[in-house]
Image: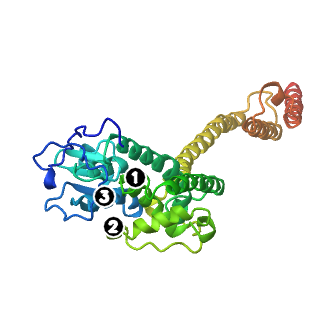
Amino acid sequence: ACGPAQGRARPSPRAPPLGPAAGAARAWPLAAGRAAPAAMAPAKAPIGTLHYIEQTLYKAEKALVAAKFNGVLLEKKPFDAQKEAKKPDFLAKNPIGKVPYLETDMGCICTTNAIARYVARCRADTSLYGKCFDDECQIDTWLEFCMHELEVPLMTWLYPVMGLLDDDARATEAARADVKKALGDLEVQLKASDFLIGSFVTLADIAVVCALREGFARVFDPAFRKPFPKVCAWFERCCKMPQFGAVIGAVKLCEQAGKPQPVLPAFKPPARKAEAKAKAEPAAKGKAEAKAEAKAQAAKPAAKVAPKAEAKPPNAPTGDLAAQIQAVGDQLREVKEKLKGQGVTGKALNEHPEVKEGVAKLTELKTAAAAARVA
């Protein structure tokens, strides 16, 4: 039994009522033993347009399979993230910016599970979202499990194989272990029932099958599958249903786990290091030019001093001594600039052997020049 909530009115979604329930009160069906309906004739008018990214189609497949079970029509439209993600009209109708998203007459619904729930609940006369309130809670539990316990680690493992993400060996190994644990939880559940919440297909089965499809096709080799016979049998049984087959096609089970592939151009992360280097190069060039200019400015006064030496006042040093003093002074300045560039300053600069040697030589020359003037 489904508990006291049976018969409770279900909130009407924004889509127009469809099928035999149209115009009637949207209440929980009371036929507790009723099985999930066979594929229904699709409605003539679509309930919305489903925008999806081709490389991550699995995110949209949940809603597409649910639509097949419920006999409702969804238009599909590929979304080019590189060209469309920053367009003002996209952000205006989908401020969150998540893809896939379902565009309806009443607005946009985004994120994979929210869209799937919307489609599953468009009809009150099917059991896709359960037959009572308790069923619905169980379905929600498995949807959360699918997203957090299964899809997150599985895609961490799969994305490098699909060329959507750079490979990280440690992250992949940890993700593989998490997927194995999640499959173990599914194995326990499927030992007790044919499907995740009982004897009929619900949105819970649809979500988990769609999440697992790429795993079974790309990385779940026979050795990995062996501990989970119930999961494998349930997965293959679901895939053979026409509603699944119409969306995901025939799934060939993996014989050898795929290897990481180079990241596809559309999914390469921004070249942050290259950008930083490009920004740093002009700054470094500017600093180098400023330093060279400062050096040139420092050398200019010395160049102007030279002509003054030619205007020899009475008792001026001889031309030879003046030239030597000028040369040694220039050399000393160059040594100090070089040391300052190396971070040598203050007392350490004055005590440096090269500086001391230059000062001593310059002092000696100046002393000789003073003696010459006295003479």
Image position, residue 99 (x, y; %) = 35, 52
State whether residue 57 is above or below residue 137.
below
CB atoms of marks 3 and 1 within 8 Å: no
Q: Residue at x 56, y 46 (%)?
A: 280
Q: Estimate the spatial distance between the alpha carbons at disc 2 and disc 3, rounded to whole Å.
A: 18 Å
Q: Which residue is mark 3?
A: 36
Residue 363 shown left or right of residue 308 in the figure: right
In the picture, measured across the screen, residue 226 lies left or right of residue 29, that is right
Name the mark nearer the viewer: 2 or 3.
3
Amino acid beneath label 1: Ala
Q: Which label is found at residue 247?
A: 2
- Residue designated by label 1: 204
| Residue at x 64% of width, y 56% of height | 173
Mark 3 nearby-residue class (10 Å; few <14, some 14–19, many ≥20): some
Whether residue 263 can be seen here? no
For the point 81% across and 39% down, the residue is 328
Establish if 233 lies above or below 93.
Answer: below
Q: Is residue 149 visible?
A: yes
